[in-house]
Amino acid sequence: MTVDCGSEVTFEGEENITVFNSSDWAERGFCNKCGSHLFYRLKANNQHMISAGLFENNKEFVFDHQIFIDEKPDFYSFSNDTKNMTGAEVFEKYAHNQGHKHI
């Protein structure tokens, strides 16, 4: 689960973050001490999706959409109604039609 944090993001302890260039249009950041996934960033607009578990105060978060719903495992479903986007819809909206298959 991630939180869309927009493009104006700064990190405390940045020396502990390693960034992996995971595709032509996105990159992933992880802790170089423990390996925990921290974020992925869309290169075109600097939009950061940050792991929800990193935030101490998450009571105000709203779980309102799911992406890659067509690839979700059959063994889970959430009780609240959300906007659901297929992989194709995600790439159309975020990848600017670059035709890449995975975030």
Image (cartoon, rainbow, N blue to C red):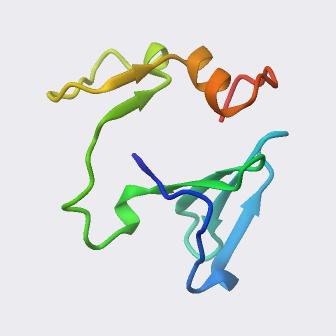
Left/right of residue 89 with respect to residue 29 in the rendered view: left
Residue occupying image coordinates x 29% and y 73%: 56
Front residue (pair 3, 21): 3
Q: What is the x, y in percent for residue 27?
A: 73, 51
Q: Residue 64 is drawn in which quadrant?
A: top left
Residue 29, placed above or below residue 47: below
Residue occupying image coordinates x 54% and y 62%: 38
Residue occupying image coordinates x 72% and y 31%: 95
Q: What is the x, y in percent for residue 24?
A: 85, 39
Left/right of residue 48 with respect to residue 1 in the rendered view: right
Q: Quadrant of the C terminus?
A: top right
Q: What is the x, y in percent for residue 59?
A: 19, 61
Q: What is the x, y in percent for residue 47?
A: 63, 53
Residue occupying image coordinates x 21% and y 28%: 78
Residue 62, placed above or below residue 35: above
| Count of marks, rendered view | 0
Left/right of residue 19 with respect to residue 79 in the rendered view: right
Left/right of residue 54 with respect to residue 20 in the rendered view: left
Front residue (pair 61, 77): 61
